[in-house]
Image (cartoon, rainbow, N blue to C red):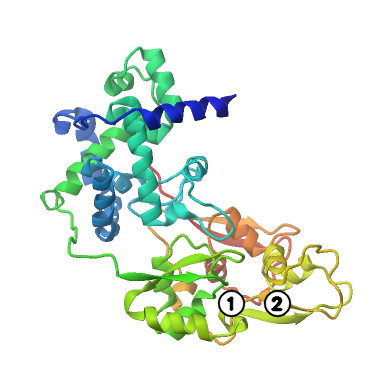
Amino acid sequence: MARIKYILLISVLVFVPITVLDAMVDDPLGRPEVNRALNQFLTRERAFIQRGLDNASLYVPVVKEILTERGLPEDLVWLPLIESAYSYRAYSPRGAAGMWQFMPSTARWYDLKIDFWVDERRDPFKSTKKAAQHLGELHRYYGSWELALAAYNAGMGAVNRAIKAGKSRDYWKLCRKGLLSRETRWYVPRFLAACEIGNNPYKYDFHFDESEKYPDFEVLDINRPVDLTILATRSGFKTETIRFLNPELRRLLTPFGRNYELRIPFKHYADALAVYHDLPAEELTGVKRYRVRSGETISEIAEKFDTSVYLIKLLNGVRNPKRLDAGRVILIPVESDDVVIDEWEFLPKKGFYTQEIYYTIRDGDTLWEIAGRYRTDVETILAVNGLSFDSTIRPGDEIALWIDTVFCK
């Protein structure tokens, strides 16, 4: 029943036409709440804001263009500044991800794919288009940017309950009555303070490089799995570059079993195209030939090579994992022996909000599964713990995990 109600509510959002956009707030600095947020950004959170401005320089032109196409206020360009410090790698303890901090449920509602291979919440282009759509629909419904932003933060249910209890559609009155959570009462003032700094960075002694430009790229249509380390190295550019251009990818392989549009640096596109079409599958996908031994199961083989049962089944067309004949030669996705991963991959740096936790290995665990569970990468786990792809982990072993989190207090 709840699902049906939500669908009906969204249908209302979609078909209510946008009229003239209301002003965000008249004289935001005249509000003490905004001034308190601004003061916090200039003192305790100065490093966080500067980090966000450093990250934002590449994305602001792109985000502004998308907002303009949607007929939304340009000031919304500064929302990711408080959501994620403009980091596509940002994850919250509650499971929100990307620059716009989409929760999994909201992301799936807006058709942002999240699976073993990709997390489209981390893609700056795809996530910005969906965030603009979401914000536009919220504004259509509430007719107020303050309430729309509150709903973006807390969800429509929380805001609607506050409106009903407070008998008011004035965000500031609802805040004064304590009908919204502390985080949501703090959210709009933080956003308005971020707008003030983003629009006037030098006034507040922040640095913002407006000359930076997102790198030019071309899209390579992929219809078979590609090992990114091989493709990048043999095309003449770094793995770091291809990972940056395709931040939604959660693996060093493009998805198995489906087509994929891979962004390639513009000046290396011809080389990458040649590499992609000329190399045999064994080299391109970074696989190893393995002869199945008597009594071996797919799960045992997957653990031996620190990969997943799913990948082995998909790569070899195995439908019944219990019927794996001894002597059969199968392909195992592994790290390529003839390609050295860039230092960037194996020496991750702690970010401003990186949290280190410790995890005890349990029976049946694999690094792929642990990485997916804690939203990190196998490469990062290996680097942090001084392991290699050949290392063996056993139940009872303790490993460190580095997790990027962003807290909006």
Q: Position of residue 216 (x, y in %)?
A: 30, 70
Q: Quadrant of residue 140?
A: top left
Query: Is label 1 in a helix, a strand or a loop?
Result: loop
- The N terminus sits in image quarter: top right
Indicate the amino acid at tag 2. Answer: Leu
- Given contact means CB atoms under 8 Å apart, are the residues at marks 2 and 1 in contact? yes
Closer to the camera, 114 or 373?
Answer: 114
Query: Is label 2 in a helix, a strand or a loop?
Result: strand
- In this rendering, position of residue 387 left or right of residue 241: right
For residue 331, which numbered disc appears in the image?
A: 2
Q: Which residue is depicted at the point 73% across and 73% down?
A: 304
Distance (Cα) linking label 2 and label 1: 10 Å
For residue 114, which numbered disc appears in the image?
A: none
Q: Is residue 12 above or below residue 191?
A: above
Q: Which residue is depicted at the point 26% across and 42% down?
A: 76
For residue 285, which numbered disc appears in the image?
A: 1
Q: Position of residue 197 (x, y in %)?
A: 18, 46
